[in-house]
């Protein structure tokens, strides 16, 4: 998941300077999904993967002019996942 998030954030895979921060965001995204009632958090699932990436894009960096857009996308996706029996059972 780290590699996918770095790619989405346009960070070179060889650049490890932000790995800890991004890994913390991945963990936070999973925890946030879990708190919402989503228990099937499989990183290979395209919707879960996209939700984690949107969370990272919304929360990475201090000067992120698009953070609100990504946050809204994450919230919409999280809400839809929480209404789907496949993810909450």
Image: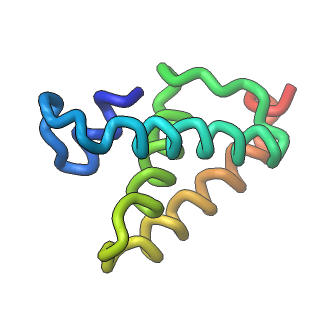
- Give coordinates of residue 4: x percent, y percent: 31, 32
- Give coordinates of residue 45: x percent, y percent: 52, 25
Q: Quadrant of the N terminus?
A: top left
Q: Nearer the viewer, residue 32 or 15?
A: 15
Rendering colour mode: rainbow
Horizontal arrangement in the rendering, residue 33 relative to residue 59 (left or right): right
Which residue lies at the image location 46% right of the left edge and 61% below the top edge? 59
- Give coordinates of residue 9: x percent, y percent: 26, 50
Q: Nearer the viewer, residue 14 or 83?
A: 14
> Hey, which quadrant is residue 28 in on the image?
top right
Which residue lies at the image location 51% right of the left edge and 45% below the top edge? 25
> Hey, which quadrant is residue 69 in on the image?
bottom left
Q: Is residue 79 above or below residue 8?
A: below
- Give coordinates of residue 10: x percent, y percent: 18, 49
Which residue lies at the image location 74% right of the left edge and 31% below the top edge? 87
Which residue lies at the image location 55% right of the left edge and 57% below the top edge? 74
């Amino acid at each position: 998941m780290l590699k996918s998030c770095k790619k989405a954030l346009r960070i070179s895979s060889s650049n490890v300077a932000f790995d800890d921060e991004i890994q913390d965001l991945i963990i936070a995204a999973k925890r946030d999904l879990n708190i919402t009632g989503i228990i099937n958090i499989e990183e290979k699932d395209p919707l879960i993967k996209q939700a984690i990436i949107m969370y990272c894009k919304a929360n990475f960096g201090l000067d992120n002019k698009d953070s609100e857009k990504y946050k809204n996308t994450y919230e919409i996706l999280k809400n839809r996942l929480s209404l789907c029996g496949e993810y909450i059972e």
